[in-house]
Image: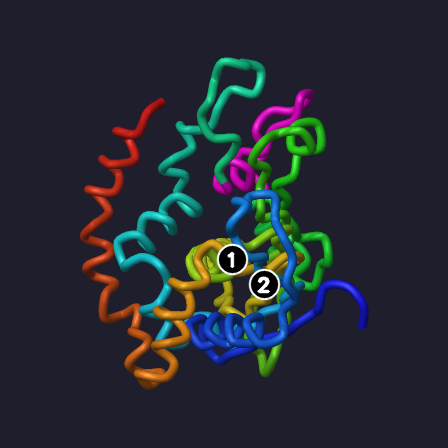
Amino acid sequence: MSGIPVLHAEGDCISRAWENSLIELHTHGCRIKTQYDRPEDPPSIDATMLITVEDPLKEPMIHKDFPGGPEDLQEYVMEVCDGIKDHLVRKPDDPTDTRWEYTYHQRLFGYSAPSLGPINQIDTLASKLAEAPHTRRAQSITWKVWEDNDCYDPPCLQSIWCRITEEKNALFLSMNVRFRSNDAYKAAFMNIFALVQLQRRIAESVSAKLGRAVSLGRYCHLADSYHIYGSYFHEFTGRFLGALERRSFEQRTMSYEDVKEMMEAARPAILEKAKSMAR
């Protein structure tokens, strides 16, 4: 096959699926330069990647070798699911405003167009599923053609699509997520973890609207460009690949339940930190 490889990784839980995706990418990805390379940087390793998490809430959910810790993970979940950093988004009609181009929460829960006010796409998605669980139209998008084709830092996450199946009289909400670009080592684990938390919230919302329990089905994560930058090959090789040789899977991972109380306890400090960031 010519062109960028199309790879697939899967796992029974988030941590195993993410780990398998990095091994698959490192083994079978192609070498290609990026727009962010310095002259001395080697090309990145890249592929189109489909990651399937069979049971998104199965433990161990957390991989110890993602670049961050439990509090960083909690902060990112709050950014995506609760919008704690939406105040950092720039005003698109103000050329002097140099804040962020977007947050995922703002695009998903308050999507706006020139002729429309903010649209809560996640609530609309949940309502569509409650009305017709088998619908193929329950999706949310982030891309704004009139802004993102020309902005410096357009969204990497592009869309979320959900559907409900009934199996043995039980309902399961499956979710597909598409990224145009995804830093496999530095960002993908946190992306997947936070989006699974969003999947759980969507299932809870649909359950409340239906008056019937909705559990989580599989999670699929498609990245058009799933990459490891050449600029941090040394770190990736030493920390991630080295850990595969030195430690067992159980030693490389931890249960979310074991750190959930600590992560929840960090919420007030995280909120204060977010509020103090420049407006």
The image quadrant of residue 237 is bottom left
Q: Which residues are drawn in magenta?
A: 104-121
- Around disc 1, counting alpha carbons within 10 Å, would you say few (fewer than 14), some (14 to 19), or many (20 or more)? many
Question: Percent x, y for residue 83?
Answer: 41, 39
**Count of numbered circles in the view:** 2
| Residue situated in front as seen by the camera: 167 or 247 | 247
Q: Amino acid at mark 1?
A: Gly
Is residue 246 part of the magenta span, yes or no? no
Q: Which quadrant holds the N terminus? A: bottom right
Q: Earlier in the sequence, mark 1 or mark 2?
A: 2
User: Which residue is label 1 attached to?
Assistant: 230
Question: Percent x, y for residue 147?
Answer: 65, 28
Element at label 1: helix
Is residue 120 part of the magenta span, yes or no? yes
Q: Residue at x 58, y 48 (%)?
A: 157
- Where is 215 relative to 179, above or below? below
Viewed as shown, does residue 170 lie left or right of 262? right
Q: Which quadrant holds the C terminus? A: top left
Viewed as shown, does residue 157 lie left or right of 3? left
The image quadrant of residue 165 is bottom right
Q: Residue at x 41, y 29 (%)?
A: 88
| Residue situated in front as seen by the camera: 255 or 121 | 255
User: Which residue is label 2 attached to?
Assistant: 45
Element at label 2: strand
Query: Is residue 131 visible to the viewer in this orientation of the structure?
Result: yes
| Residue situated in front as seen by the camera: 175 or 275 | 275
Q: Amino acid at mark 2?
A: Ile
Viewed as shown, does residue 276 lie left or right of 195? left
Question: Percent x, y for residue 164?
Answer: 62, 66
Tags 1 and 2 touching, CB below 8 Å: yes
Query: Is residue 203 visible to the viewer in this orientation of the structure?
Result: no
